[in-house]
Amino acid sequence: RRSVNPEQIRSLTVVDAQRRDRLGKAAEWLDYPEAILIYDHHLEAERDIPATKVWLEPVGATTTLIAEQLQAQQVTLTPAEATVMALGIHVDTGSLTYDHTTVRDAAALTWLIGQGASPQVVSEYLDPGLSTQLQELLTLALETLQTETLQGVQIASVLLRTDNYTPGMSHLASHLMELTESDCLLLANSFDADETEQRLTIIARSQVEGVDLNSLLKPLGGGGHRRAAAVTLRTSEPAVILEQLRQALKAQIPKPPTAQELMSSPVRTIRPDTTVDQAQRILLRYGHSGLSVVNVQDQLVGIISRRDLDIALHHGFSHAPVKGYMKTAIKTITPETPLPEIEQLMVTYDIGRLPVLAQDQLVGIVTRTDVLRQLHQLKQPRAKSDGAVVRTSIRERLQAALPEALWQILTTAASQAEQFGWQLYLVGGAVRDLLLAQGRPTLEFDLVVDGVNDPPLEGAGVKLARSLLKDYPAAQLQVHGKFQTAALQWSQDSSLGAFSVDIATARTEFYPYPAANPEVEASSIRQDLYRRDFTINALAVRLTRPKGGELLDFFGGLVDLQHQQIRVLHPNSFIEDPTRIFRAVRFAVRLGFEIEPATKDYIHHAIDSGVYYRIQGQNNKAPALQSRLKNELKYILRTSSWQAALELLASLGALQCLHPSLSLSKSCRQQLRLVDRWRDQFDPQATLISPWEMRLETLIACLAPIQRGDVAQYLHLPTDSIQRLQHLGQTQAEIVQGLEAVALPSQITHQLSPQDLPTLILIAAHAPRVRSAIWRYLTHWAQVKPLLNGGDLKRLGYPPGRGYKQILESLLAATLDGQIRDRTQAEQFLAEHYPLTSNTQTYRPGSPDKDPHGNQG
């Protein structure tokens, strides 16, 4: 430093630092240069250096920023330069393994290797081993290391005193972490900088999610990353500083989840006298691997597993009570039992499920799956979705995505649920679209209440909805279904616009037979999500504390969103409810996703089983299936992507769900396109029939005439649609035959005018021979009116009467056929064909051998 004349400095580049105190005495130079450039990747660092230009970006290594600029300017490096820069990226990113590593770091490293960086040299200097001095310090550190276990986390700290600054202490910290298997480490090195000043360097390392070492050391002027940080400061009390940091670090250790947060509730229970066969059926119905057995006081007396039941059934004891086969030596936990203790119990005693008791009452159960899932979330709290990082808590993202009024509804509902002692979740499509960041306006919230051990008769969802209504009196409350779900609805002219909030209690469902209405019972949030159709719709966000904003993803929905695929939750899903096939197609087309291969296989299996064809012959067994199926078709056919959706349905063979012989043939495709164009042409405002209904009728019309009415009735279409499809074949035959026998416009009009527009469009699509005549009729002849009206006839002296109809029809026919073109010719036509007598002012028709349309009498 002494060899530099600061007055000659014109430009200064600062790397990996943004504060003056990080530069030591070299900070004096900052007062001289005309330009100061900063390169750094610590986004949260405070800056007090007056920089001319700053390159501050979220990459793993500052070297990456330099390498990118060199690459952009096509600068060629020497092998030595490339090797040193590659070493910098390796050290700063842990050879691309640290959690702050980005794709840009890997790309920069690839470019440097292409510039001649030597991996062998990098390897040599990356882990050179400990020097003699560091080896001695390692021995001393292992002897004096202080460790403490808090919340299952091992915290280690050590203070090493040396005569002077010792390089390589960060390398020593890595060895200590590895040898002691510590989760957090504070390595302090106290040394004399000179005769008058004492320095303290602290290196911090962590492997614990929730600990932020950068914020820990920042008040002391240090910094770094969440898992690695350092600070050097002047102090005469290094032990005091270390102890203060140790206590601050302990305060950051997150409390482990408790059984209250992990458990499923309410618990499915049986009595001791329940038979083995009955218990097996209950397991099948609810998909559990075991059941809790309680006495008449609802106190836990045993647990029976699927294996216990299988053994009893194998030996022929299906009618024996479960009390002879259940386990009675039960390990239990309380709602406050922490996760590490639960994990230890399960491993020590090989237990797959632990009942949760509160005052001797069974309030929940924690399974091995619950523990594994929680451990996985703790180790991998972040996932990448659509280029952005989605953390375990997405509260901030949810709040930012919603208008303030809608966010206020969620917070108000969550607050009221907490007062009742419940958990509240936002589930389904709103969560999916939030994670996809599609920017579509949210038109409804689906909320689920959980943690209701003894729900009131009216249902927790209804109770919460009534409470929420007090804060939002402009909404209308609707209660529906035997399970008592509730909905608050705002009208279009309200401050929220057309909006609804559906609230239900967490429930599970069971289909007694294919396509039946499910039988619904109260259950947990996990079971509620499992009853849904696809993984991307089985996501939930916890709205209540203590984990408000937590994303619940039990079935890999987040991964499927990233992979842009539709995956069903269980193999029999399409057999239980065939409308899910149409939902899969609807979501795939709407979101631009693919239906994943296994889900396609399940769809093909369900269709090939023939179950849907059998259901169609048993309408009384599936009274609501037709309505649900029609609604799904409505959702598909009213969108702009309806053609792509039909193509996908056809490729899956799913149109057979409507009728075994229905397919999307070439002619059927042509008819659908033609009908859609004609409906747009002649009924653009959809005043006669909605576009989706016209498309559905066209699709059904692709069947044989004898089958059309049955399918229309099966789907509960409107009466006029059913009658139109029932008689379409006969009507078409009559019109084709009638039009082939006539040629004049008046004759064609006479044939077609009795039919409504949808019928004519369907016939035009199915009968090319008469398509031209129908087109001319709709585009011109149907709009032609007689050149004279009843008032004109009266003015001309024709007495009012039933004869007016015949006269006007004759005038119209003559006009259509070009015999008359103006009012003068029309009056001449009347004088010739309907002359008035001067005495009585009566008239007699002319040409009595023909009717007004030129047909022979």
Image (spheres, grey):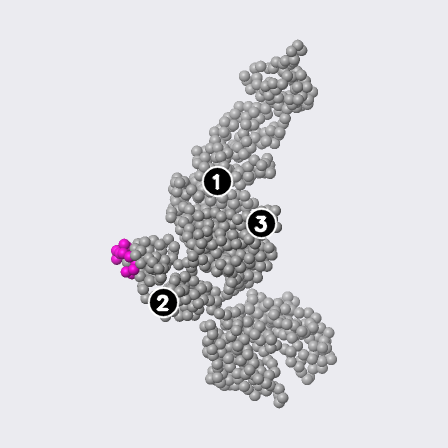
Q: Is residue 498 left or right of residue 728?
A: right
Q: Nearer the viewer, mark 3 or mark 2?
A: 3
| Residue 317 forms part of the magenta stretch | yes
Q: Earlier in the sequence, mark 2 or mark 1?
A: 2
Q: Position of residue 84 (x, y in %)?
A: 58, 75
Q: Which residues are magenta?
A: 314-325
Name the residue that disc number 3 marks: 474
Distance of label 2 from label 1 (alpha carbons): 63 Å
Measuring from the top left, give residue 299's x and y in whole percent. 35, 61
- The three-letter amino acid code for the residue at tag 3 is Ala
Q: Is residue 339 left or right of residue 188?
A: left
The residue to which callout 1 is attached is 665
Residue at the spot 26% in from the left edge and 57% down from the top edge: 315
328 above or below 501?
Answer: below
Characterize the local packing of mark 1: few (<14), some (14-19) or many (20 or more) Cα atoms within 10 angstroms.
Answer: few
Q: Please name which of the two marks, 1 or 3, marks the residue nearer to the observer.
A: 3
